[in-house]
Image: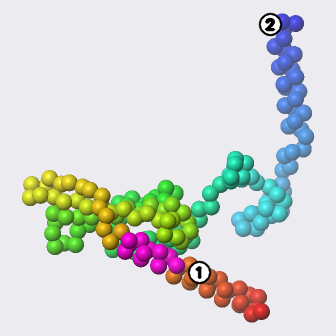
Amino acid sequence: MTGPNLIKPILLILFLLSFLLSSCGIYKPSDARKVSPNVDERVQQAIEEGRGFNLGKGFGNGGTNFEFASSNELWRASLEVLDFLPLANVDYSGGIIITEWYSEGTSNDEAIKITVRFLSNEIRADGLSVIIHKRVCNKFQQCTTAKIKSTLEEEVKLAILKTATLLEKGKYEKNKEEYIKKHGAN
């Protein structure tokens, strides 16, 4: 068998294999009356039955462990510390906050822009990068922009870390109180 005569048996074998594999009982339709409308209960049932998949664990070291913005103390602390500044770009998935140009009003020819980059979810000094740019404009509104090194970077970073630590401590205290209410003090 060569050429066109070989195609028909191969197609027949592929068809039979796909039919046999699809009828192996892998797909089991569920009774809608037995499925809970509560999402949390369905998730818990799926976990207990071992259903679902995680793409992160199939490739090397596994996926990252980034939390939602509302539960990440470092993120929330950064927004609290920078709340007096207008924000230009806030990207949680990219781990960056960029403010608009800000001047204190005394001089319109100088302004700063603060960029906060999240390198980790952990509350550590090396898990956060604060960059400050300064814009200086002349009387003809010709501006130059430069990245500056100043104590303000460290002050902002320290304020974010302190606030994040307080938020985390508050979360643990709240969880501890809820646990004691639920299970009693032991």
Location of mark 1 (residue) = 171
Tell me if residue 80 can be seen. no
Give the residues in magenta: 154-165
Q: Residue at x 88, y 22 (%)?
A: 13
Q: Quadrant of the N terminus?
A: top right
Residue 114: percent from the left, percent from the top? 34, 64
Is residue 55 left or right of 87 when viewed as pictured?
Answer: right
Q: Earlier in the sequence, mark 2 or mark 1?
A: 2
Q: CA distance from mark 2 to mark 1?
A: 71 Å
Q: Is residue 30 visible?
A: yes
Tell me the mark number nearer the camera, choosing from 2 and 1.
1
Residue matched to label 2: 3
Q: Is residue 10 left or right of residue 146?
A: right
Instruction: Reply above or below: 119 against 70.
Output: above
- Dot 2 surroundings within 10 Å: few (below 14), some, or many (20 or more)? few
Residues at discs 2 and 1 in contact (Cβ within 8 Å): no
**Whether residue 20 is situated above or below residue 44 in the rendered picture:** above
Q: Which percent across, then down, holds residue 155?
A: 37, 74
What's the image's color scheme?
A: rainbow
Residue 125 x %, y %: 48, 69
